[in-house]
Image (spheres, rainbow, N blue to C red):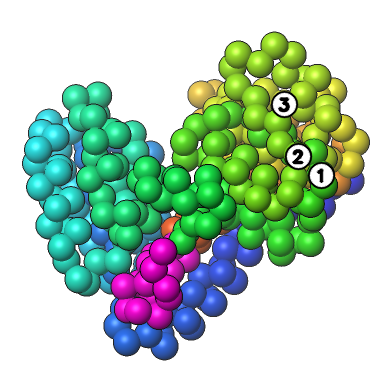
Amino acid sequence: MSTILDGKALAASVRQDIREEAAKLPRRPGIAVILVGEDPASQLYVSNKARDCAECGFLSRRVDLPASCSEEELLEIIGRLNADAAIDGIMVQLPLPESIDERRILEAIDPEKDADALHPLNVGQMVHGDPVIWPCTPAGIAEMLDFYHIPVDGKTCVVVGRSDIVGKPMALLLLQRHGTVILCHRHTKDLAAMTRQADILVVEAGHRGLITADMVKRGAVVIDVGMNRDPATGTFTGDVCFDEVKDISSHITPVPGGVGPMTRAMLMQNVLTLAKLHMGLLPRH
C-alpha cells in the first residue's frame, strides 16, 4: 500500500514558514496577478492565490481585464508593474485569449519579477543549473520529495509531458539532482515501456486515467500533476488511475490534494525569494 503524499498539509506548513519569514522583512512582499477573460477555472485559481497571499501576509494586487483587451493594453499594464517598487512578482494567468501572443507577454515581464520563472533568461538559468527560482509545480514536487525523504540521485526518472511550465523544467530539476531522466510526450512510441522503467514517475499529460497499474513498476514513486474534470460527476481526477496504482507504487500523490496545493505554496515562496532579491538580501546573478 502506498504512502500518500499529502500536498495539502505540507503546503499549509510551507505557508506558515513563509508568513513567519516575510514578517521579518523591511516591507511586505508584493505580487500582482493579471487575469484576462472570465474562464471559471482561472477565476478560481486567482481567488485561491489571493487567499494564500493574505495568509502569508503579502501585498496582493489583482488586475482583471476583459477577453477583448488588446495585446498592447496588456503590455502597458505589465510595464507599469515592472516599474512598481511595491511589486516583487508578476504572474499572468494562463491560458491567454488566442488573439494575444503568449510568448510576447511572458517575455515582457521583468525577469526579476517573473514569479512563474517562464522568462527566457530564467529558463536559461535553469538549463545552467543555477536559477533564482524554479517554476512553481516542479518546485512543489521537489519540496514533496524532500519532505518525504525520497532520493533522486541515481534513480530512473520518467516525466510524461513536455510543457514549458511543468514537463521541461521538471526534467531539468531531476537532472540537476542527478536522476537519469526520460522525457516522454505524445510522439513516444511505447509509453508503457518507458513508464515501467521509472523509479520516479511524474505525469502531466492532461489525459484522465492515462497511467494504469500495468504501466508502473512495483515500488515506484508516482507524482500525478493531472487535473481533469469528470464530465459525469464534476469531480477532478488525475492522469493516473489512483485506485489501481496505489497498490503498486511506494508513494503516490492524490488528486486533488497532492501537487496542486504545493504549486500554489511555491508561488508564495517564489515571491518571497524575489522580494529578498529586491531588498538586497540575496545576491543577483
Q: Position of residue 135 (x, y in %)?
A: 48, 50
Label 2: which secondary element: strand
Cα separation, mark 2 vs mark 1, equals: 6 Å
Q: Give the residue at mark 1.
A: 155
The front one of 165 and 277 is 277
Q: Along the polypeptide, which appears first: circle 2 or circle 3?
A: 2
Question: Horizontally, is 51 left or right of 155 in the view?
Answer: left
Amino acid on which the number 3 mark rests in the picture: Ile
Q: Is residue 14 left or right of residue 21?
A: right
Residue 279 magenta-highlighted: yes
Q: Which residue is mark 3?
A: 211
Tell me if residue 13 can be seen. Answer: yes
From the viewer's perspective, is residue 181 above or below residue 78? above
Residue 80: x %, y % from top left? 12, 57
* Nearer to us in this view, 250 or 187: 187
Magenta-highlighted residues: 268-285
Return the disc, 1 or 3, that comes first in the chain's sequence. 1
Q: Is residue 257 visible?
A: no
* Mark 1 to mark 3 CA distance (whole Å): 20 Å
Callout 3 secondary element: loop
The tag on residue 180 is: 2
Are the residues at dot 2 and dot 1 in contact (C-beta closer than 8 Å)?
yes
